[in-house]
Amino acid sequence: MSGPTYQQLDMDETEKDKLLPSEKGGVQCCTPTRFTIATLSGLVCLLTAALFCLIRYPVAPRSIGNIGRTGSIVFQKSSEDTLMGLISDIHLDPSPRDCVGNSKYGVFGCDSTLGLLNVTLEDMARNLQGSEDRALLMLGDAALHQAEASWDSSVTLASIVTVFEQFEHHFPETPVFPTIGNNDLPTHNSIPEISWYSSLLRYFEESLRRGGRVSLPSNFREIFMYGGYYSATFADKLTVISLNTNLFSAKVPDRNTQKGYAVSHLQWLNETLGSLAGEAVIIGHHPLTLSLYGLYQKQAGQASWRLEFFEIFREIFNQHHGKIVGMFFGHEHQDTFVVERNSGVDMASFTFPSLSPIYSGQPSYGIAKFGESEPNGERKLKDIFTFHTWLDYYTVLDRKPEFLTYRSFGQILAVKDLSFDKMFKKTELIIEGSDGLKTFIALKGKIYQERYVPKLSPHLFYCYTTNFTIAAFVQCVEKFGYSGKPFIVNS
């Protein structure tokens, strides 16, 4: 049955004008039902877009304890602080188009583009402004990943040279302390010939001398040409000791050749620390720690260093630990630390995340803040901040990436400085203190970002964070009722 006509309702013209067009007999485009559906559809689209942005951008970082530029100021600095930018595993691909397509800043699963490196160095330069004492620590693997079967040393060198050119462009008056990674070699996991170190010497030395704040020992070139390592003092305050950890790597096949170079390297380290009057920072590529990825993704205990070299290193550290204020490494593409008490001496080592997004990690860099502590005035590592960009978010929007800062290790552990003894006491609280679970969750979120959420208990995480060797880790996990057998693979 049809509805009543206007005549039947006996409405006047004024009342008719108040009706919807469809009720006047026009085109039925906006009936109440269709209007409701269109409105709901629009709201759903808006909510979906909003949820995507919130989850991917500001909420995700904050949900694991991160605060962006729009939140409270987290990264505070003083003109009296010594600031050292930290960047690791750049893995610059000079010709990335086959992998990233038209994406200027790169995509997950590929190495870094020049655009990503530039926007990162721009942000780092901005955050290092305001400090008279500033430098960069480059923790190895400037070069891209290559398949071992088709390794091309000329491509490796071209990648390294481009990275150093960008350092010079963005930091014309700031020294850079580089170290050699396992991809910065003429062939993978090799002991290079002197000619390879000779090709790197110019770029290493120029980057160190930039700004005129670094003093080099008289035998700098001789030492570097022999083994690719060196020491250099920044602003008469901190000596940076750059290790060539390739000489200690568990993956070098020629053990006989490796041992001779490794022993010489460790003897040099002992002598360098012994003659040092002030404080030292040790940098390298392969971390002292076990592989966190290997432990929790492959259930495999993987050590980057051969055990015999690590044990000698630890003896040297125990002898000179009072002079060492920080140890920084890369290679693992993760943001973590391990602290262990051995023979009454606490030793802590920090491992930094990568710039390269090849393993689906958000591109990152760090800033370490050094300063004098009260009341004795010793120079200490005050804190470490990590900055990251949500690459997948900006890739979708086709926008220039911006960087956020994670909560620092000092903020998570609630310590005024990252001295090794304080860190060990705080790490013990992961399984003992009332705030242990909160600390565990914050550290887990900081380390893993969004890549994967492994089935990781506080006890397993505690055992990783307080043990450097496979044997010590296995002993720890067995104490808590876990089987150590799955973790024994590479000693």
Image (tube, rainbow, N blue to C red):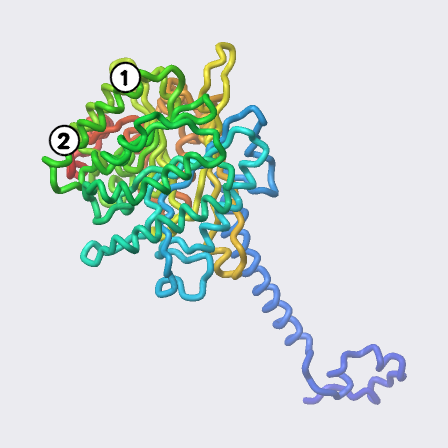
Residue neighbourhood size for the residue with mark 2, other residues' Cα within 10 Å, grouped as few (<14), some (14–19), many (≥20): few
Residue 482 in sight from this viewpoint: yes
Secondary element under disc 2, as helix, strand or loop, is helix
Residue 266's place in the image compared with 155, above or below, is above
- In depth, the one of 56 and 320 nearer the eye is 320
User: Residue drawn at (16%, 41%), measured in percent from left and top?
Assistant: 252
User: Residue drawn at (41%, 40%), measured in percent from left and top?
Assistant: 87
Residue neighbourhood size for the residue with mark 1, other residues' Cα within 10 Å, grouped as few (<14), some (14–19), many (≥20): some
Residue 303 in sight from this viewpoint: no
Separation of marks 1 and 2 at Cα, in angstroms: 23 Å
Question: Where's residue 182, x and y in %?
Answer: 26, 43
Residue 380's place in the image compared with 117, above or below, is above
Q: Disc 1 marks which residue? A: 318
Among numbered discs 1 and 2, the one appearing first in the sequence: 2
Q: Disc 2 marks which residue? A: 260
Question: Where's residue 489, x and y in %?
Answer: 15, 39
Residue 211's place in the image compared with 141, above or below, is above
Quadrant containing the C terminus is top left
| Mark number, residue 274 | none
Secondary element under disc 1, as helix, strand or loop, is helix
Judge from the rendering whether residue 171 lies leftward or rightward of residue 352; answer left or right: right
- In depth, the one of 253 and 424 nearer the eye is 253
